[in-house]
Amino acid sequence: MHLVRLYDCRNVAERDLGIEAAVSAVKSGDLVVLPTDTVYGVGADAFKSWSVTALLNAKGRGRHMPPPVLVGSRNTLDGLVARMPSRARDLVEAFWPGALTIVVEQAASLQWDLGETNGTVAVRMPLHPVALEILRETGPMAVSSANLTGEPTANTADEAREQLGYKVSVYLEAGPCPAPVPSTIVDLTQERPVVLRQGAIEFDQLRSVVPDIQPAAA
């Protein structure tokens, strides 16, 4: 059983130590819990298939529910997708970093295994300084909400630790999420963009950027 460490990122010195420990853990293939602008996430190196498997196992999820990928910059997206529809660029320009997840066709050359994705990937750039600092060091991370499947989402790292325990090496605490609402998910792999999940970004906000977007199915 490995050591579990929790760092309080509200303390400057501990924040730096925590980010360093989290980056090291991710590069080693371990899981970390980190704050985002929506809910706390549990993350792994997206390019280490065994780490992604550990992430799914930690949550009690199967491969049929692949995790989304978080990136630290908009530029990273170009290396992950087969093609960037103009509507995707418009949405990214308007809402990244922020609470928008886009589903796009992944580049065929990517050496990763996120689960049963059918050639697509859900990507988001979070608006949280701790998350962005880690992502810029680690590269793309597979990140899912830091809770067991079917249990309430964690609003602090401490709450995440109560559910995930020793499955995670490093927990980064940054206090309660200001607005614990999951991201809005938009599918951009079809002719017209479709909202798959209504979340923090309202439909009208999306429509102001992409007028032909379709709402989530009732």
Image: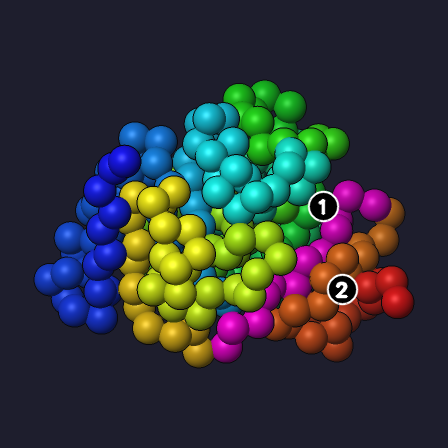
Q: Position of residue 120 (x, y in %)?
A: 69, 37
Magenta stretch in the rendered image: 179-190
| Amino acid carrying mark 1 in the image | Pro
Q: Position of residue 41 (x, y in %)?
A: 46, 55
- The residue that appears at 42% across and 36% down in the rendered structure is 45
| Amino acid carrying mark 2 in the image | Val
Quarter of the figure that contains the N terminus? top left
Q: Position of residue 74 (x, y in %)?
A: 49, 50
Viewer can see residue 10:
yes
Comes first in the chain, label 1 or label 2: 1
Q: Which mark is residue 85?
A: 1
The secondary structure type at the circle numbered 1 is loop
Q: Which residue is mark 2?
A: 210
The front one of 123 and 191 is 123
- The residue that appears at 50% across and 77% down in the rendered structure is 179
Q: How many neighbours does mark 1 have within 10 angstroms: few (below 14), some (14-19), or many (20 or more)?
A: some
